[in-house]
Image (spheres, grey):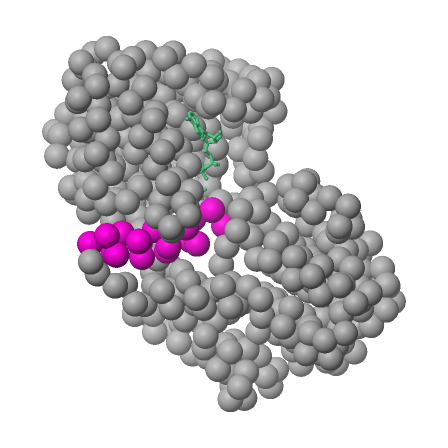
Amino acid sequence: MEISVIGTGYVGLVQGAVFADTGNSVMCMDIDEKKIANLKRGIIPIYEPGLDELVRRNAQEKRLEFTTSLKAAVEHGAVIFLCLPTPQSEDGAADLSRVIAVAEQIASFAVGYRIVVSKSTVPVGTVDRIRQIMRKKGKMEIDVVSNPEFLKEGSALEDSLKPDRIVIGTKSRKAILVLSDLYAPFMRTGNPIMIMDERSAEMTKYASNSFLATKISFMNELANLCEQSGADVDWVRRGMGTDPRIGQQFLFAGIGYGGSCFPKDVKALIKTAQEHEYEFKILRAVDEVNERQKRLIVKKMLKHFNNQMRQKVVALWGLSFKPQTDDIREAPSLAVIQSLLDAGAKVRAHDPIAIPKVRSLFDGKVDFFENNYDALKGADALAIVTEWNEFRRPDFERMKSIMKRPVIFDGRNIYDPKLMRERGFTYFGIGRNGE
Ligand code: NAD
C-alpha cells in the first residue's frame, strides 16, 4: 500500500518506519529541511530505542523515503497520515493551525480517492472540520478519519508493533476496510481494532491521557498527605495496586508529569469542556496539582538549606521528561533548573541522552556532564529528576566521596529511605517515611 506521513516527528517517523517494515511504500514529509536532509543521509533526529536500525533498513530497501514536498506526498499516498504538532495555544486550547493549513493544501493537490487520517491529537469535532475544508476546497473524493495515536515515547516502537488497541473513527466502509487491512499485521495476537464514530475516537485520546494524568496527580496529592501524616506512599501504592479495579500502573508518586502530551492534552480537554459550557472540575485540579508538584523538590531544598541557596552546588541527574527518550518538552527538570538558578544555586546536570537539548536552553548558565559521577563534584545536594535505570544502583560510597555533602532529594523515589540513611545519606523522597 502507498502511504504518506505528514510531519516526521516522534509519531510520524516511528509510524512511517513501522508501516514500511510490513512492506508498504511509505513517504515521510516534513517542512523541516534540515531534518529531511539528515534523514536522507541516515541521521535519525530523535532518540527512540530501536528506531535507528528500523529506519535505516527500510530506507535502504527503498520502502521508506523522505521529502519536503507536500505535493509529492499527496500524490504518493493512498492513505495520508497527519502526524502534525497540536501544541497548547495561549488560552489552553490545542493549536490546530498546522493541521488546518496542511488540510487546505492537501485538498488543493489531491487527485483521485484519498484517505486522510488524523493521528495528531485533536479536539472533538476537528475531523468534521477538516472534512468540510477539504470538500469545499478540493475536487477529489476523500474520507477523513480519526485514528488517535497511543504510543509512548521511550517504547514507541514496541507500542507501534504491538498496540494495545487501534481506534478508528469513521463511518466510511471503504476507509474501515483499508485501515483494518493496513493494521492487521500488528494485531495478530487479538488486540482489538475498534471502529467508532469520529468524535468518540477523538475524545478517547484525550480521555486516556487525562485519566492517566489524573492517576499521577492523585498519587502526588496522596504522597504529600502521607508526608504530613506519617504514612509511606510506597506502601500505600502497593496496598492499593493489588486491587485489580485500581491496577499497579501509574501509581508512582514523584515530581509531576511532563512531556509533549499530558500537560497540553489535560489543558485542551478543560478548554473543550468550557467550549461546551461544562466545567471539568477534576481536570482543573489535576493540572494545578501538577504545577505545584514540579516545584516541590526545590521547595524541599530551600527548607533544608534554610533558604540559603546562593552558591550552593546542586547536582541534577536526569533531564528528559521520562527515561528512554531525549524529549524535554514540559520536562520537570526545566522548572527545577530555573528555580535553582533563580535561588542563586549552581547547577551541574547529567542525562544519558538529553544534554544537547537542555544545553540549548541554559547554555552558559548550567554545567553539563556526560558522566553522572562528574556532575557530583563538590555538590551540596543531588536531585534525582528522571528515573533512568542507570541511577538505580550507583556506587554510593563513590558518590559520598565526591559530594561535598551527602544529601539526596529523590524526586522519583528510586531509593529506599532506610537504606539510604544506613548508607550515610541525608535523604528526602516524595511521601516516604522510610519505615
Ligand atoms: P513532533 O513535534 O515530534 O513532530 C511533528 C513534526 O511535524 C515536526 O517534525 C515538524 O517539523 C513537522 N511539521 C510542523 N508543521 C508542519 C507542516 N506544516 N508540514 C509538515 N510538517 C510539519 O510531534 P509529535 O510528538 O510527533 O506529535 C505529533 C502529534 O501526535 C501531536 O498531536 C501529539 O499530541 C500526538 N501524539 C504524540 C505522542 C508522543 O508521544 N509524542 C503520542 C501520541 C500522540
Where the C terminus falls, by quadrant?
A: bottom right
Does 302 appear above or below 375?
Answer: below
Does 415 appear above or below 368?
Answer: below
In depth, the one of 136 and 184 nearer the eye is 136
Does 145 appear above or below 291?
Answer: above
Where the N terminus falls, by quadrant?
A: top left
Which residue shows up at 30% across the image and 67% down it?
281
Give the percent coordinates (x, y) of residue 204.
26, 50
The reply to whether residue 182 is in sight is no
Residue 81 in the figure: left or right of residue 379: left
Give the percent coordinates (x, y) of residue 29.
43, 21
Give the percent coordinates (x, y) of residue 369.
78, 48
In depth, the one of 47 and 61 nearer the eye is 47
Quadrant position of ligand 1: top left
Range shown magenta:
259-276
Which residue shows up at 73% across the image and 79% down it?
306
Residue 383 in the figure: left or right of residue 403: left
The reply to whether residue 287 is in sight is yes
Which residue shows up at 79% across the image and 78% down it?
424
Q: Quadrant of residue 175?
A: top left
Q: Is residue 347 magenta?
A: no
Q: Quadrant of residue 15?
A: top left
* Count of numbered circles on the image: 0
Residue 195 in the figure: left or right of residue 85: left
In depth, the one of 399 and 227 nearer the eye is 227
Which residue shows up at 49% across the image and 50% down it?
259
Q: Is residue 273 magenta?
A: yes
Question: Which secondary structure dominates the residues rendered in magenta?
Answer: helix
Q: Quadrant of residue 27?
A: top left
Give the percent coordinates (x, y) of residue 273.
25, 56
